[in-house]
Amino acid sequence: QTDNTTGIQRPVSFQVKEEVLGGFAAGVVGTLLGFPLDLVKTRMQTRSASSNKHSPLSLLRHILRTEGLSSIYKGVGPPLVSLSIVNTLSFTSYSYFRQNHFRGTDGWDYRNALSGMMGAPLFGIVTTPENFLKTQMQLDNVQSKREELMESKSQQSISQTNQTLQKEYPTKQPSGRFTNSFHCAKTLASTHGATVLYTGHAINTIREAAFVGTHFFCYEGYKSEFRKLLLQFGNGLGRNVNKAKPKSNLESSSSITSLAIPMAGGCAGATAWAFTFPLDCVRAGVQGQLIPPHANEIIQKQGAYHVLKNLWLTKGFWGLYAGVGPSVARAFLVSGSRFSAYEGALWLCRWSGLTSAGEGEFGEEGPGAYDD
């Protein structure tokens, strides 16, 4: 890794234990903090155009009132596991490709985007079943009611069914088909085969590539910008406070980096979500379709193009951004908290003697946490 101030190539050490524990901590903390907002996002993405009457906050209150507190964490199991794995993979793969193949530099360098995108096919293998199960569980209470209506009115169109559902739903306590994520996976796989878990794999992998590329590109850019701003602010403050004890250059640089990293991570996560949100909206439409409970029923899946076309015709351009508010807020919160958890785990590893006290794979500046 090259030091931009001196131009000297400095070695970067790799601590497997640190990366695994740091990625696991980042995945757990970020998922638990962001999941309620992710639920709101999914409900807003998949409801009909005529029922978009709830703001994100009022929708969350409505869910709590009609479905109970436990419903906001329904389906949290798969992302809790998969994002812990993906965070670990994203840290290591990004650093490997950036250092050994693309030679990305600090700042706004497109090679950082390419380095991040290289891991997307692997991420997709892990996150497609996770996103599918999460989306099915988050919509389970709604879909169980939709299933009853579709059985009683088999000739009714999907849009009419959704409208009827929205009218009846607030007055009735919903009861989902699945008790937990494992039950959901077992039920669907046993009736329709294991491949049903990879519904929407193509659009999910495309979204992963676009997201991680944007995320790492923006992270390195924002980090450089924030470091410059903080350095200017620190120098101005130091000139005004003459009696204060001056800090060494190393101490000042470390403090600036500590502030710049979570700020850059939060802004990069929010930017990446805003940029790729239409793809996620289409993914949610593909993976959130009602899967028949019986094996003899044919699944009439709608592909990504059909979902995109339907969204455009029924909701217009802004239909592709339904639920973007909770997602951007969640992304900023989750990205910042995940990186703080990552750094905390690394400090704990070194403090406890589990790993050496040297720098981790990314030196003193980490790559930012993956947020899906």
Image (cartoon, rainbow, N blue to C red):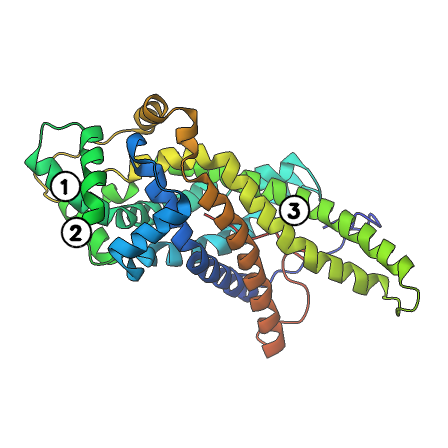
Image coordinates for residue 354, horizontal then vertical, percent: 57, 75
Q: Earlier in the sequence, mark 1 or mark 3?
A: 3
Amino acid on which disc 3 is placed:
Gln
Element under label 2?
A: loop
Compared to residue 284, the image places residue 350 above or below, namely below
Q: Residue 147 — which label?
A: 1
Q: Position of residue 33 (x, y in %)?
A: 45, 59
Q: Which residue is mark 3?
A: 99
| Marks 2 and 1 in Cβ contact (< 8 Å) | yes
- 363 and 27: which is toward the camera: 27
Q: Which residue is mark 2?
A: 177
Q: Amino acid at mark 1?
A: Glu
Question: On the picture, is 366 further left or further right than 168?
Answer: right
Is label 1 in a helix, a strand or a loop?
helix
Quadrant in the picture for residue 43 = top left
Q: Position of residue 58 (x, y in %)?
A: 37, 48
Q: Secondary structure at mark 3?
A: helix
Q: Circle 2: is it few (<14), some (14-19), or many (20+) Cα within 10 Å? A: some
* Residues under numbered marks 1 and 3 in contact, where contact means CB atoms less than 8 Å apart: no
Q: Residue at x 85, y 58 (%)?
A: 237
Q: Residue furthest bottom?
A: 352
Counting residues from the start of the chain, the first of labels 2 and 3 encountered is 3
Residue furthest out toward the right: 242
Residue found 47% across the figure and 42% down from its top = 325
Q: Is residue 118 left or right of residue 243?
A: left
* Residue 248 visible in this rendered orientation of the protein: yes
Question: Residue type at mark 2?
Answer: Arg
Identify the residue at image location x=55%, y=39%: 213
Question: Which sits earlier in the primary sequence, circle 2 or circle 1?
Answer: 1
Q: Is residue 309 above or below residue 191?
A: above
Q: Nearer the viewer, mark 1 or mark 3?
A: 1
